[in-house]
Image: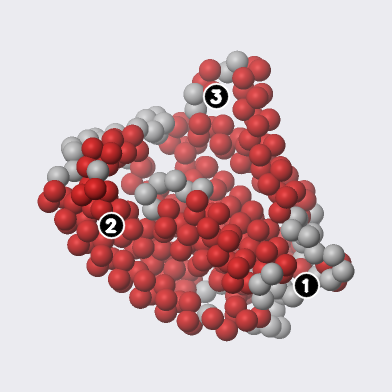
Amino acid sequence: MSNMLDSTKEFNEVKIYTAVFWYIFTMLIVTITAYIIGDVYLLNNSNLLSLISTTLFIFVLFYKFKVKRNKLSLLIKDYFTKINIKEIFGIVVTQLCLSMSLSLLLIGIIYFTSPNMLNKLLSQSSVDEVSTYSGLFISMLITVIGAPLMEELLFRAIIFKRISRKFNIYLGMILSSLIFGSLHIELAIIGAFLFGIACCILYIKYKNILIPMTVHFLNNFLSFFPQLDINSPVDSTPITSLDARISIISGSLLFLIGMYFFIKFIFKNKSYLKEGFSPRIDEKLNLKI
């Protein structure tokens, strides 16, 4: 794979503090604008606000990366040369298995420590804005398209790569995945951390951001799929002791299966972690994160 395009060299570097500044700035400017114009619908629709700010931030990143048609064309050609469909679907299934197992385990554990808090959390998570087809469409855009694009550019192409070059690839992988996981405040936060690790490995292996993006797209689409039926009744029945036990047992089995394939994936690709990111010529003298 060393004779193929290293797309990490094809675009401008973006420093972490620059990306974080624009990430916060775009969220603030969209929210402040909504307050100034007094759009009640926009202010009460967090998904729409998130979609607008995410889209704006993606355009800012494209500008900072200096994405041009010829470079993008090379990236896409390189993507189709390197992509491994079997590996991608294997990772997606593994990550969904891990996320589901961790959610089930946490449900069972929280129930036996604080059942009232668990039922409150579950009832709150069932209340969302996807009650209309327009709300469904907005939610799908942000979840399936916006989030994978923005998060892969920010967490893998910027944070992971910059920390890896400044220190080492293992620290970059762990820190970027910890930050990525911490922003996913649902019950599957640990699953998000493991997902971040897998995407980091894919990025360093193929050196093409479109490949972890593809995994992210598929993962989010399959996770979002159950929401497509907006007319399905929401089960608000409180969790029982039997439900909690079943959650722990099934979650444990799924976790063992998922971790087996996750660890197998890591060992299969550990040689790529030794390669790291080769420094750019303009960074050899001054590499700031």
Q: Is residue 178 left or right of residue 237?
A: right
- As rendered, which of 240 and 258 lies closer to the eye? 240
Tell me the SS state at disc 2: helix
Evaluate if marks 1 and 3 touch, with contact meaning CB atoms under 8 Å apart. no
Residue drawn at point x = 24 percent, y = 67 percent: 253
Q: Position of residue 284 (x, y in %)?
A: 84, 71
**Residue at label 2?**
105
Instruction: State the quadrant of the C terminus.
Output: bottom right
The residue identified by callout 3 is: 42
- Residue 3 x/y as whole percent: 71, 83
Query: Height in image: 50 above or below 101?
Result: above
Q: Amino acid at mark 3?
A: Leu
- Residue pictured at 69% horizontal, 79% vertical: 4
Q: Residues within 10 Å of mark 2 (few under 14, many from 20)?
A: many
Asked if 29 appears above or below 253 in the picture, the reply is: above
Q: Which mark is in front, 1 or 3?
A: 1
Q: Amino acid at mark 1?
A: Pro
Crowd tier of the residue under label 1, counting other residues whose Cα lies within 10 Å: few below 14, some 14–19, many 20 or above: some
**Extreme residue in the left direction:** 242
- Does the image show residue 127? yes
Mark 1 highlights which residue? Answer: 279
* SS at mark 3 in the image: helix
Alpha-carbon distance for marks 1 and 3?
A: 44 Å
